[in-house]
Amino acid sequence: MAGRLEGKVAVITGAGSGIGAAMAEMFCREGAKVIAADISGQQDAVAKRIGSNCIPFQADVSKSADVQAMLQAAITHFGKLNVLVNNAAIDGGMVPTGEYSEEEFDRVWAINGRSVFLGMRYGIPLMLKSGGGAIVNTSSMAQVVAFPTMTAYCASKGAVGQMTKVAAVEYAKQGIRANVICPGPITTGITAHMPAEYIEAVKNAVPLHRMADASEVAHLGVFLASDESSFITGSSILIDGGYTSL
Ligand SMILES: NC(=O)c1ccc[n+]([C@@H]2O[C@H](COP(=O)([O-])OP(=O)(O)OC[C@H]3O[C@@H](n4cnc5c(N)ncnc54)[C@H](O)[C@@H]3O)[C@@H](O)[C@H]2O)c1
């Protein structure tokens, strides 16, 4: 039986760790060919583990030239671009708004927000040439609820939701769908450095009473990238164990 992403070519950012790495693995298992992009170098090991359908690519997603080269790699290696997953992000400094530094705000915005604009700005023309496709942007439940001390992160994730809706409406007639994944607490590199008592408090705040595995988010990524979600566009889908329902 053919995989759910058979014949599709995808670029996934932040693919060296966590959700991006889980998506690269699951996308390839479902038949896609993947450019696994990251700044860290860890994308090399991820791609090696997956095999020849996954090509690692080093890119800083906040830099236009890197993003353009990363997208071009899909054309060079696999001849087209059908799926773009803008997933790389950082959490940034945790400081109240009245003390948050301008430099840190700009840094978080460049990696979490501007990067998504750049990905869509240069990815959409390639997707149009490839006959359409699906954009999947990873935001956060911070798109819809406030996290004190994380003004830059929350602002950037709110922007991802809005940019995605704009693209969804603009390109619907040309066969490109664009949707957002809003994860709650997931065990990944981003949460690895958080103090144990903070993690415990997070778990207690989740109705399902646990953090998720990155693979649980990757399942949603596969669905939104595949033709199974053909009538879903402009949507932001929460995958948060019920956190924002309280
Ligand atoms: N883990 C969570 O609890 C959680 C919750 C909500 C949203 N998210 C979102 O999920 C996405 C994936 O994060 P994760 O949890 O897998 O974290 P992670 O830290 O495991 O993975 C993020 C990856 O992005 C890469 N990256 C960082 N800056 C980059 C840059 N400038 N250019 C290219 N790559 C860069 C990192 O090297 C890393 O490999 C992010 O958008 C994050 O905001 C995560």
Image (spheres, grey):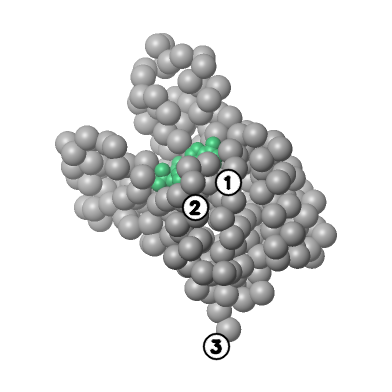
Name the image quarter holding the N terminus: bottom right
Labels 3, 1: front one: 1
Q: Quadrant of ligand 1?
A: top left
Task: Look at the numbered discs 2 and 1 and tell me whether their residues touch, using CB distance below 8 Å.
Answer: yes
Labels 2, 3: front one: 2
Q: Looking at mark 2, is its residue's CB closer than 8 Å to ligand 1?
A: yes
| Disc 1 secondary structure class | strand
Q: Quick one: label 3, few (<14), some, or many (20+) residues within 10 Å?
A: few
Tell me what residue is drawn at x 53 percent, y 46 percent: 38
**Nearer the N terminus, badge 2 or badge 3?**
3
Question: Mark 1 sits on what residue?
Answer: 58
Spot the residue most to the bottom: 1
Q: Nearer the viewer, residue 37 or 237?
A: 37
**Could you tell me the amino acid type at mark 3?**
Met
Which of the labelled discs sits on residue 1, or is there none?
3
**Nearer the N terminus, badge 2 or badge 1?**
2
**Could you tell me the amino acid type at mark 2?**
Gln
Whether residue 137 is visible to the viewer of this picture, yes or no, is no
Question: Mark 2 sits on what residue?
Answer: 43
**Nearer the N terminus, badge 3 or badge 1?**
3
What separation in Å lies between label 2 and label 1 (alpha carbons)? Answer: 8 Å
What separation in Å lies between label 3 and label 1 (alpha carbons)? Answer: 33 Å
**Could you tell me the amino acid type at mark 1?**
Gln
